[in-house]
Amino acid sequence: MANRLAKSFNCPTEFTLQVLGGKWKTVILCYLSLGPLRYAELRNFMPNLSDKVLSQRLRELTEAGLIERRKGEGGDKSEVYALAERAQSLRRVLAELYGWGETNAAEFGVSVGHPLRSTQGLRKR
Amino acid sequence: MANRLAKSFNCPTEFTLQVLGGKWKTVILCYLSLGPLRYAELRNFMPNLSDKVLSQRLRELTEAGLIERRKGEGGDKSEVYALAERAQSLRRVLAELYGWGETNAAEFGVSVGHPLRSTQGLRKR
């Protein structure tokens, strides 16, 4: 991603948003910020997204050095996606984005799922 | 905006990003999170944005109830844009987005401006 990023930004926020890379990539990073996930698990979390788009976003995030594929540590050793070293610093931003949505949905008259709660059991990988 | 927002989201992050409304709106909110600004001041902060797009984004944010126009308290009483009540809760998210960009730009090989620093003198309005 470093190569594709503009070299200068007027505002730090503009740069952060460019790194996060749009709605779906940010949502994927958010899911992975809690722990590694298999493709099928990510798939379940994003039922509105086509396989094509999900695969593409995962590839872009991998190329950007923000996520990586690695062997899972579960019984079946299936491959998982995980936040790469470079994305560790994004954890707080991601937590704020998630937390604000969770706290303020009712006031805006919308309902939101709580996908991260259901991943508690998946953390140990 | 409440009317235009989807009524349910799978992930709170998706909802937050929808409210923030894309790059330029988020950047505008970020500037206004430090204090009210006149149109011309916002204009200076976003030289890459056309007047047409800036005006449109400001209109959308106003319609969404996230910002409002009010009489400034400076000597010339010129009109300013300010965060509306509804957007006050976004301050922490906005600060995180700005702060991450400021802290991590060098590691990603990009340079960022520090526009908020130069607005320190503008806060009292």
Image (tube, coloured by chain):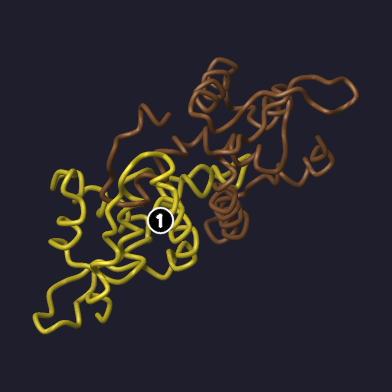
Chain colours: A yellow, B brown
Give the residue drawn at x 34%, y 46%: B14
Q: Specify the amino acid type for callout 1.
A: Tyr
Of the pair A15 and A47, the residue shown nearer to us: A47
Residue A89: x and y, percent?
A: 49, 66
Looking at the rendering, which quadrant does residue B75 occupy?
top right
Looking at the rendering, which quadrant does residue B79 occupy?
top right
Q: Residue furthest top?
A: B52
Tell whether A13 sits left or right of A105.
Answer: right
Q: Please tell me whether residue A76 is drawn above or below residue B24 in the rendered image.
A: below
Residue A35: x and y, percent?
A: 30, 71
Give the residue drawn at x 19%, y 77%: A71
Tell whether A76 sits left or right of A80.
Answer: left
Q: Residue furthest left?
A: A76
Residue A67: x and y, percent?
A: 33, 63
Give the residue drawn at x 62%, y 54%: B102
Residue B93: x and y, percent?
A: 53, 52
Give the residue drawn at x 35%, y 67%: A83
Q: What element carries label 1?
A: helix
Tell whether B106 sits left or right of B115.
Answer: left
- Report the residue marked by disc 1: A98
Q: Which residue lies furthest to the right in this view?
A: B75
Q: Mark 1 lies on which chain?
A: A
